[in-house]
Image: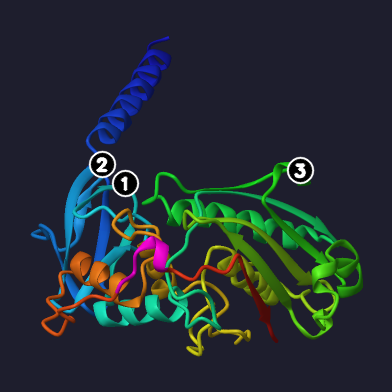
């Protein structure tokens, strides 16, 4: 009996020792890697060489160079400074774009020349989109993704929203992925247009208040089938419906032709141009000179070469067609 008692006592001591080791383990630590694109720097307390305890909060500030503009972080946030709670190995990058490049892109895809869109700014308030036709799961998924992307991108405009609706009667934008013959049977205004030669076509209307209010979109089911073309066609055609024009700049989603690997999606410059169109300081029916002045003010650019006498651009003086139509090639 004595030997058995000693053995049991030994087992208890061994278990007690293991518990003591578990309780003495050090706190978890993670690595925070912070970087920046060309055009600016980042500031934060990095006295620990990027190693932080689990749950530690780090404040990071993005500082743009004089000729660049901060547009957000790689995690999608636009807060500056930003608070990062370190609970895993984390990588975050500050993104900047050149101010003059942004103004140029705005003038390329927002301000038209009369033939390529109206010569002033127009924008949506609420867009209700109905999708039908020859639909694949990939097409529906890509459209839903872009709808969510747009609502997030244009969160600077509290009046804007885009929603998919389930009934045509509830919509103001009708997108059909179908063949040209079927689309012309629904919309006779396209009868004389060789739709079969294009990936898509867009037609939209605006009102006297400077708001785009309705649109029709043809997506060619005969040629828009691969995932990369679907991705481009949805974004390009809805880019038109959002009031954007064609540009000769091949890196832009609004180039009339798809350039695989080059303009598959909205670039940072495209996105910022669209956000500035929806900035509360950008009024509708602003022409090139007026919109440039607004942009320069927001970006902190001091332009000493502004014309002393601004052109007459009152609401009444505008020549306002009721609709705009775009053909989008391959």
Return the x and y of residue 250 as percentages of the image width and height. 51, 89
| 246 vs 61, nearest the viewer | 246
Choose the circle earlier in sequence order: 1 or 3.
1
- Seen at 50% across and 49% down, the residue is 125
Image x and y of residue 25, in percent: 25, 40
Q: Residue at x 38, y 11 (%)?
A: 2
Residue 255 visible (yes or no)? yes
Front residue of this view, candidates 78 and 241: 241
* Residue 73 as seen in the image, left or right of residue 284: left
Q: Is residue 312 above or below residue 52?
A: below
Q: Which mark is residue 55?
A: 2
- Vertical placement of residue 137 versus 323, above or below: above
Is 281 positioned to the left or the right of 5 in the image? Answer: left
User: Which mark is on residue 196?
Assistant: none
Residue 149 to residue 178: above or below: above
Q: Which residues are magenta?
A: 312-317
The reply to whether the magenta stretch includes residue 3 is: no
Q: Which residue is mark 3?
A: 169
- The mark lying in front, picked from 2 and 3, is 3
Say which residue appears at 34% left-offset and 23% top-offset: 10
Please provide percent x and percent y for residue 65.
14, 76
Q: Residues within 10 Å of mark 3 (few under 14, many from 20)?
A: few
Secondary element under disc 2, as helix, strand or loop, is: loop
Q: Are marks 2 and 1 in contact (CB under 8 Å)?
A: yes
State the separation of the CA atoms marked 2 and 1. Answer: 5 Å
């Amino acid at each position: 009996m004595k030997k058995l008692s000693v053995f049991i006592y030994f087992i208890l001591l061994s278990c007690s020792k293991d518990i003591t080791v578990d309780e003495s383990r050090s706190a978890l630590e993670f690595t925070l890697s912070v970087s920046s694109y060309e055009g600016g720097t980042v500031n934060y307390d990095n006295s620990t060489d990027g190693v932080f305890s689990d749950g530690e909060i780090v404040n990071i500030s993005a500082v743009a160079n004089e000729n660049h503009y901060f547009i957000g972080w790689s995690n999608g946030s636009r807060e500056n400074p930003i608070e990062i709670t370190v609970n895993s190995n984390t990588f975050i990058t500050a993104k900047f774009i050149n101010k003059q490049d942004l103004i140029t892109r705005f003038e390329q895809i927002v301000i038209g020349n009369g033939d390529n869109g109206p010569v002033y700014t127009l924008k949506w308030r609420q867009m209700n989109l109905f999708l039908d036709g020859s639909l694949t799961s990939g097409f529906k998924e890509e459209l839903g993704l872009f709808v969510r992307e747009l609502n997030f991108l244009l969160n600077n405009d509290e009046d804007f929203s885009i929603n998919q609706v389930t009934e045509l009667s509830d919509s103001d934008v009708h997108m059909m992925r179908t063949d040209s013959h079927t689309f012309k049977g629904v919309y006779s205004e396209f009868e004389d247009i060789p739709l079969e030669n294009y990936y898509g076509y867009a037609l939209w209307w605006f009102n006297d208040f400077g708001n785009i209010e309705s649109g029709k979109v043809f997506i060619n089911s005969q040629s828009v089938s691969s995932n990369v073309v679907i991705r481009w066609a949805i974004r390009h055609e809805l880019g038109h419906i959002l009031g954007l024009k064609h540009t000769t700049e091949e890196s832009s989603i609004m180039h009339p032709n798809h350039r695989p690997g080059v303009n598959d999606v909205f670039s940072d410059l495209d996105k910022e141009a669209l956000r500035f169109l929806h900035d509360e300081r950008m009024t509708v029916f602003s022409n090139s000179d007026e919109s440039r002045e607004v942009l320069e003010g927001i970006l902190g650019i001091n332009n000493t070469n502004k014309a002393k006498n601004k052109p007459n651009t009152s609401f009444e003086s505008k020549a306002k067609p009721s609709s705009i139509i775009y053909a989008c090639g391959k």
